[in-house]
Amino acid sequence: DQQVKQNSPSLSVQEGRISILNCDYTNSMFDYFLWYKKYPAEGPTFLISISSIKDKNEDGRFTVFLNKSAKHLSLHIVPSQPGDSAVYFCAARSGNTPLVFGKGTRLSVIA
Amino acid sequence: DSGVTQTPKHLITATGQRVTLRCSPRSGDLSVYWYQQSLDQGLQFLIQYYNGEERAKGNILERFSAQQFPDLHSELNLSSLELGDSALYFCASTSGQGKETQYFGPGTRLLVL
């Protein structure tokens, strides 16, 4: 039973346009959500996070939106750059419990 | 560079064998987490240690065990290996027990033939 779902295995976007990566969750106890980015042959690196008391968090080109009623979050990258091409993992947790990860979405930004 | 190191980078072994994966956390971090990433799967949490003690357990098989040593490095032992154990194994570290950002190592790719 997957508690965190990333239903799009891959996404292609043109350079300069917006990339939108989506994530759905089923556990209403989750109170903190994170996005990690992973390049080949490297470990995941933390990108941005959001607490359940907020609905938006922005950091430069990256914005995460949280819709608690829909149990949905999304990561927006504007403008997309070729260096953003990577696998993006959504993760969630409740309190101090371990992170639960989605399967990831492979983003390809085409120049 | 996250500051978390893992050795070896690659490991090829046969079914039935036993291997040990090693992780050194970032300087000052007390928690170590182990994850398994199988093909086309997300990262599955295996186990967490904090300052030498087991803190949380996930979907870790009985054939797998881990420990954290006084110098805070951790080892993940995988025994009676099966083909399905082939995966990427990541460790991550944090300074505290759970709410901090996790910093991941580069992973160990295990191939069981």
Image (cartoon, rainbow, N blue to C red):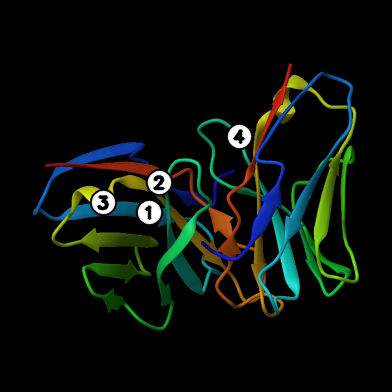
Both labels 1 and 3 in a single chain: yes
Both labels 2 and 1 in a single chain: yes
In the image, residue A84 lies at what x, y percent?
27, 52
Disc 1 secondary structure class: strand
Mark-to-mark CA distance, 3 and 2: 21 Å
Disc 3 secondary structure class: helix
The residue wearing badge 3 is A83
Q: Are marks 3 and 2 in contact (CB under 8 Å)?
A: no
Mark 2 surroundings within 10 Å by alpha-carbon count, few (fewer than 14), some (14 through 19), many (20 or more): many
In the image, residue A99 lies at what x, y percent?
60, 62
The residue wearing badge 2 is A6
Dot 2 or dot 1: first in sequence order is: 2
**Chain of residue at mark 4:** B
**Chain of residue at mark 2:** A
The residue wearing badge 1 is A23
In the image, residue A91 lies at what x, y percent?
49, 59
Q: Are marks 2 and 4 in contact (CB under 8 Å)?
A: no
Dot 1 or dot 3: first in sequence order is: 1
User: Which label lies toward us, 1 or 3?
Assistant: 3
Mark 3 surroundings within 10 Å by alpha-carbon count, few (fewer than 14), some (14 through 19), many (20 or more): few
* Residue type highlighted by circle 4: Ser
Mark-to-mark CA distance, 2 and 4: 16 Å
* Residue type highlighted by circle 1: Cys
Residue B13 vs A78, above or below: the answer is: above
The residue wearing badge 4 is B38
Q: Are marks 2 and 1 in contact (CB under 8 Å)?
A: yes
